[in-house]
């Protein structure tokens, strides 16, 4: 495996590792994102076993010990499995996550006390960059789920939203909704609930220019339209589940 690096928006880099053994023959990408600034942020630490690969990728962008913030969508191995390895490498690095995630997992599992983020709270990264945390409980899964929005570039760090199999382009202007729907049909990874569409449409109100996917290509274009289409599909799934 190798770490491939692509700048998907100004100062935001996708570090992608493709694992062909998951959902063969298609495989699955595991994507990690670095936002540069005076206080650089890593979104998704990666699996603990992937730490050497992700660290080597980060080292091509900045000295790993300069990392200041660690964030992710929810408490799950591929999103935060290596958070303590990163806190060992970077002495000033601190995990930042929503209140629920900190209370139920991170206060115990993180080697250093995490920063608790309230819904809508921001972190200034410097050099004109700022990220805003948004609570998205159970979307697409996890009581503690949330996303980050980088305001200067209009980039939404989506976590597991729009998950799709395969190893396509690093950045696309094509359809990401159809492949996400197809992958949902395969994995059934989302926690269907009546609030799904409403929560995702709230993200669409940001009108993001770039969508950074944990599993799949990043998307450049009408982020609001893609989010609304995904919300419509989930609304249909919820109605079907409720009979």
Image (cartoon, rainbow, N blue to C red):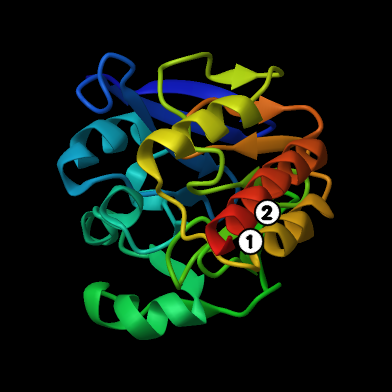
Of helix, strand and loop, which one carries label 2? helix
Residue displayed at 40% across by 49% down: 189
The percent coordinates of residue 117 (x first, y second) are 56, 76
Farthest residue in the bottom direction? 103
Image quadrant occupied by the N terminus: top left
Farthest residue in the left direction? 49
The percent coordinates of residue 232 (x first, y second) are 73, 46
Residues at circles 2 and 1 in contact by the CB criterion of under 8 Å: yes
Residue displayed at 40% across by 67% down: 95
Residue for badge 2: 235
Calculate the distance from the C-alpha at mark 2 to the C-alpha at mark 1: 7 Å
Residue for badge 1: 196
Image quadrant occupied by the C terminus: bottom right
Asked whether, in this view, residue 201 is left or right of residue 133, the answer is right
Judged by depth in the image, the label closer to the viewer, 2 or 1, is: 2
Q: Does 2 sit above or below residue 150?
A: above
Residue 65 visible in image: yes
């Amino acid at each position: 495996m190798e770490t491939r690096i692509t700048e998907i928006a100004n100062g935001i880099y996708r570090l992608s590792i493709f694992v062909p053994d998951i959902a063969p023959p298609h495989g699955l990408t595991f994507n990690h994102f670095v936002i540069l600034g005076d206080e650089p942020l890593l979104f998704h630490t990666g699996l603990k076993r992937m730490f050497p690969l992700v660290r080597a990728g980060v080292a091509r962008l900045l000295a790993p010990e300069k990392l200041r913030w660690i964030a992710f969508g929810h408490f799950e191995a591929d999103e935060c499995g290596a958070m303590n390895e990163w806190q060992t490498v970077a002495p000033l690095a601190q995990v930042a996550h929503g209140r629920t995630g900190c209370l139920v997992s991170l206060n115990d599992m993180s080697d250093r006390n995490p920063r608790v983020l309230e819904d809508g709270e921001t972190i200034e990264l410097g050099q004109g960059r700022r990220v805003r945390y948004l609570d998205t409980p159970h979307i697409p899964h996890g009581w503690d789920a949330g996303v980050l929005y980088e305001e200067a570039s209009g980039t939404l760090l989506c976590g597991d939203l729009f998950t799709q199999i395969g190893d396509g382009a690093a950045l696309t202007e094509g359809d990401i909704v159809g492949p996400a729907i197809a992958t949902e049909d395969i994995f059934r990874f989302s926690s269907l609930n009546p609030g799904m569409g409403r929560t995702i449409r709230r993200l669409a109100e940001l009108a993001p220019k770039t969508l950074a996917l944990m599993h799949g290509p990043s998307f450049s274009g009408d982020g609001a339209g893609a989010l609304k289409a995904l919300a419509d599909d989930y609304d249909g799934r919820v109605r079907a589940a409720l009979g």
